[in-house]
Amino acid sequence: MSDTRLQAVLLMGPTASGKTAAALHLARQSPIEIISVDSALVFRDMNIGTAKPDEEELAQCPHHLIDIITPEEAYSAARFCSDAQRLIGEICARGQLPVLAGGTMLYFKALLEGLSDLPQADAALRQEIEEHAARAGWPALHAELARLDAAAASRLNPNDAQRIQRALEVVRLTGRPLAESYAQRESTSPAIDYLPLALQPAERSVLHTRIAQRFDAMLDEGFEEEVRQLRTRYRLDIEMTSMRCVGYRQMWEYLDGEVDAATMREKGIAATRQLAKRQITWLRQFRENWSGYQEFDSLDAQHLAQLEAALSAWRET
């Protein structure tokens, strides 16, 4: 490795694949600091439903990008990239190795491939879109988007106000399909060498079992009370980024009396499985497109030793 370039490890994987345990294992072998790559762990007071590392785990090595905003705030891929690159520089300057661990694949993609060169929000156009939606409803705006950009509309629910609004805004401002705007990217990390590593259990059924067990453990640990307290402490609604996190939306519906406890549990587990499926799809794309990408079976008894070996070989080149 060139001494003039920074180094960082990316440790990815679907939910419940063992990323936290693997990162902490690496911390016991090498001087590392962990940067969380998780869009839910940034929120304070959301501990049980996010499977946030506990105090004992956090004490094993420095952790970053955990508990940095309230559930009333929003966090973006752009802000993550800015925060992560700053932290990588600071950690390397301390002589430590940054390990970016988590499952928010959009953040990993943005970090390695750069952010899309999208136009800034246009207040006047946004107000026009909102006023149109107030008169005609968001399904009508979705139909308009379908006329302008059928591919973008096909990926959105007709009532997904936030995403329909932004998609319409970008398409109107640029005059081109959303996919073309996303394809025009700027590199955000030209001077960082990354080692992309991924954990994934070879048996999908094992992942599903772990997901169900984790959700039940969350319920036993007081997840319901956690969400009750969040609703009391903060001014939240179900469409906020924090409450769209897997598990929280389902618990919100239960607390509002829209579903019973058994249905809440069933929907929460199903939503988590869908999240894992999307994460695995992201990993398939990374495997095809990223140089140096390596994947390990987290059910293999030797996977931690294999991670160590991959890290050692990379640092010696």
Image (cartoon, rainbow, N blue to C red):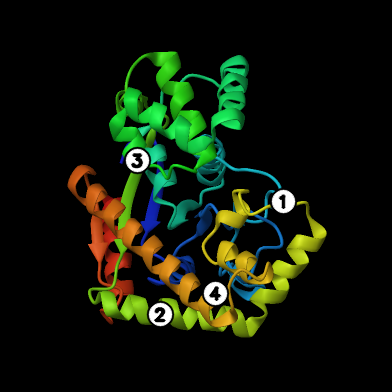
Q: What secondary structure is marked by label 3?
A: strand
Residue type highlighted by circle 3: Asp
Of circles 4 and 1, the one toward us is 4
Mark number, residue 193: 3
| Residue located at (53% from left, 38% from top) | 161
Q: How packed is label 1: few (under 14 Cα within 10 Å), some, or many (20 or more)?
A: some
Residue located beneath label 1 in the image:
70
Residue type highlighted by circle 4: Met
| Residue located at (24% from left, 61% from top) | 295
Residue 85 seen in this snapshot: no
Q: What secondary structure is marked by label 1?
A: loop
- The CA distance from mark 2 to mark 3 is 33 Å
Mark number, residue 230: none
Which of the marked residues, 4 or 2, is nearer the chain's N terminus? 2
| Residue located at (29% from left, 67% from top) | 200
Residue type highlighted by circle 2: Arg
Of circles 2 and 3, the one toward us is 2
Residue located beneath label 4 in the image:
264
- The CA distance from mark 3 to mark 1 is 32 Å
Residue located beneath label 2 in the image:
210
Which of the marked residues, 2 or 3, is nearer the chain's N terminus? 3
Q: Do residues under tags 4 and 2 come within 8 Å of each other at their CB atoms? A: no
Q: State the residue in front, 178 or 197.
A: 178
